[in-house]
Amino acid sequence: MIRIGLLGKPNSGKSTFFSAATGKDVKIADYPFTTIDPNVGIAYASIKCVCKEFGVKDNPRNSVCIEGTRFIPVELWDVAGLVPGAWQGRGLGNKFLDDLRQADVLIHVVDASGRYDAEGKDLGRPGMWDPVEDIKFLEHEIQRWFWQILKRNWLKFARRVEIERKDLASSLSILLSGLNISEEEIRTAVQLSDLNPEKPSSWSEDDLLEFAGVLRRVSKPIVIVANKMDIPAAEDNFKRMRKLGIDAIPASALAEFILIKLVEKGTIKYIRGSSTFEIIEPNRISSREKMLLEKIQELLEKWGSTGVQEAINRTVFGVKRMIAVYPVEDENRLTDKKGNVLPDVFLVPEGTTAREFAGKIHSDLAKNFIYALDVRTKTKLPADYKLKHRDVIKIYAAARRK
Ligand SMILES: Nc1nc2c(ncn2[C@@H]2O[C@H](COP(=O)(O)OP(=O)(O)OP(=O)(O)O)[C@@H](O)[C@H]2O)c(=O)[nH]1
Ligand SMILES: [Mg+2]
């Protein structure tokens, strides 16, 4: 399952985002380092389900379908706040970074209202801190963290690679094992960084720093969330980010949090990611909740959504370039063996072939693969056919030998 890490300075709203996205209750408070040990939960990437197009009522098993939107599980991690110098062990420093090693992609939750300083200290009111600084600092921190790991035994490592004529990328993937970076990603970073892969012992500390930056961008891409957009001061900051070319997603984790709480109570109807909600039990809504909902309504009208679902979707489909594919066993009824309609949908990397996809379902299916059927058009697809987003596929395989 794809693993998304939430990061940002203390008090930026990571735990609020986490709780809103996963429905899990966690500690949220307006003091720094509320979170120490990581929270792990299941959030969902969403796509337009194919059920409506096929005119069927589905029975999802590995995902959830709500009125034509299919929600596919992803793992979300909420960790401690990051403060400047964490790479050298400041704040919760290395512990924080350690908790993020396994992430495939990161969401940087930024306090766009600018109320807290770099350490998460309350400056008394919004507009006192420049969130653009937070964005710069965070990339810098992670780059330094990678750099520190790289330079630890660099010369010794580099000489050995040269003497033993080893492949640099594959040797580096062993050196960096534990950071969850693929050899492919390392190879890309080496190519992009304009350094001589034949002579790593000649790389200077500065070269290594540059390489660390490229490696960070390739292996741990970051989606930026401009959080707390419900606070007026956030708007100017957000516009400035846009001017600077920072492609942040405007969001209010708090708005999503409140909406989801009211959905759980059964007083409103709201589908994650949508631009509207509906009050279904007006008598059970307090006057305070009514006031909050009015503010949220304004926010939704202005920004289109709370931004939480959009952020998750961007990490999965935009940055990690995943596609969603539905396997079925019966191409006419769109069911599995038990008769569940469109039971599963899998997230796989763009470029996954029909045979590779078969292997994801069962290794025998890949081994005995004959062809795949595009259920939509009823055309046969070869083993090396590259799957498309929202394909519905039936795999034909030779019967297993007894
Ligand atoms: N207005 C507003 N407040 C928010 C939003 N998101 C979070 N907050 C508030 O910001 C404060 C910090 O929220 P947390 O979610 O605990 O922040 P955190 O980033 O997890 O903080 P640490 O665990 O200390 O690193 C709380 O008072 C939240 O209610 C938002 O979208 N809008
Ligand atoms: Mg927290």
Image (spheres, grey):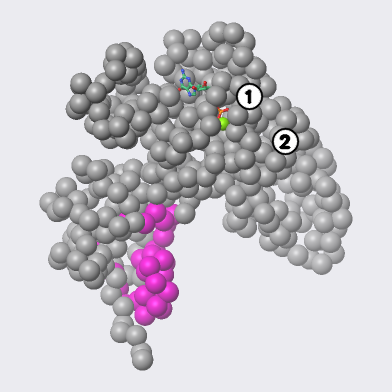
* Secondary structure category for the residue under label 2: helix
- In front here: 324 or 227? 227
Image location of residue 315, percent across then percent down: 46, 40
- In front here: 278 or 334? 278
Q: Is residue 349 magenta?
A: yes
Q: Residue at x 35, y 32 (%)?
A: 260
Q: Residue at x 41, y 60 (%)?
A: 352
Q: Residues within 10 Å of mark 2 (few under 14, many from 20)?
A: many
> Is label 2 in contact with label 1 (beta carbons under 8 Å)?
no
Query: Label 1: which residue?
Result: 32
Mark 2 or 1, nearer chain start:
1
Is residue 148 visible in the rendered image? The answer is yes
Q: Residues within 10 Å of mark 1 (few under 14, many from 20)?
A: some
Q: Amino acid at mark 1?
A: Pro
Query: Label 2: which residue?
Result: 93
Q: Compared with residue 214, is residue 234 higher up or lower down, i.e. above or below?
A: above
Q: Amino acid at mark 2?
A: Gly
Q: Which residues are magenta?
A: 345-374
Is residue 236 visible in the rendered image? The answer is no
- Which marked residue is nearer to the observer: mark 2 or mark 1? 1
Q: Compared with residue 350, is residue 291 higher up or lower down, i.e. above or below?
A: above
Q: Is residue 84 magenta?
A: no
Image location of residue 101, percent across then percent down: 63, 47
* Secondary structure category for the residue under label 1: loop
